[in-house]
Amino acid sequence: MNEKTVELVTRSGLRLYVRQAGSTDGPILTHLFHHVSHEDLRFRFLSGLNEIGPEQLRALTPIDDGNAVSFLAFDAESGAVVASAMLVSDAAGERGEVAISVDADYRHRGIGWTLLSFVADQAEARGLSKIESIESRANVAAIELERDMGFSVEEYPGDSTLVLVSKTLRAS
């Protein structure tokens, strides 16, 4: 584990190594998104995507410019990539949008919860005062997870199929 890799443990006991994604991680993300369920792809991209193309891959591996950062999570035992998480902050550096995707074979093991908590800590360390996510109203599992973590849920303006979940951070 290098100095930029963080070890996390999910509530199910799964050990993860998490590191920032970089410009050469396209093949790793391609592999991951071939193992994300079609339903989760739809929820992640809020569209009918069946496969992630080169443009989406580039957007998922930003160089950390202070506004966008992407993380990869690996199973510490097998080394397999199991999830990605992204945090994109607004121009004012006050709010950040979070998106997480988990390999279908690794769902229900606490990875989403653990990564969301990790990203919230990253957002707070960057001085953001709020994190949020736009969710399909049909993504009940994600909305419930976010509620359990203290997020509030409200209608998304102009689209009754979506909700905005948000959490105020203790940023200094």
Image: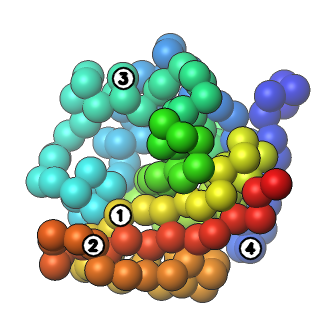
Measured as percent of width and height from the top left, residue 76 is found at: 74, 45
Disc 3 marks which amino acid? Arg
For residue 156, which numbered disc appears in the image?
A: 2
Q: In front: mark 3 or mark 1?
A: 1
- Front position in the image: 91 or 55: 91
> In the image as oriented, which residue stretches furthest toward the top?
24
- Say whether residue 163 is left or right of residue 150: left
Whether residue 18 is visible here, answered yes or no, is: yes
Q: In front: mark 3 or mark 4?
A: 3
Asked if 165 appears above or below 63 in the picture, the reply is: below
- Front position in the image: 7 or 144: 144
Q: In front: mark 2 or mark 3?
A: 2
Q: CA distance from mark 3 to mark 4?
A: 31 Å
Instruction: Please name the residue that numbered disc 3 is placed on.
Output: 58
Q: CA distance from mark 4 to mark 2?
A: 31 Å
Q: Earlier in the sequence, mark 2 or mark 3?
A: 3
Instruction: Please name the residue that numbered disc 4 is placed on.
Output: 11
Contact? badges 2 and 3 (CB < 8 Å): no
- Say whether residue 169 is left or right of residue 21: right
Contact? badges 2 and 1 (CB < 8 Å): yes
Disc 2 marks which amino acid? Tyr
Instruction: Please name the residue that numbered disc 1 is placed on.
Output: 134
Label 4 neighbourhood size at 10 Å, few (<14), some (14-19), many (20+)? few
Q: Earlier in the sequence, mark 4 or mark 2?
A: 4
Q: CA distance from mark 3 to mark 1?
A: 21 Å
Label 1 neighbourhood size at 10 Å, few (<14), some (14-19), many (20+)? many
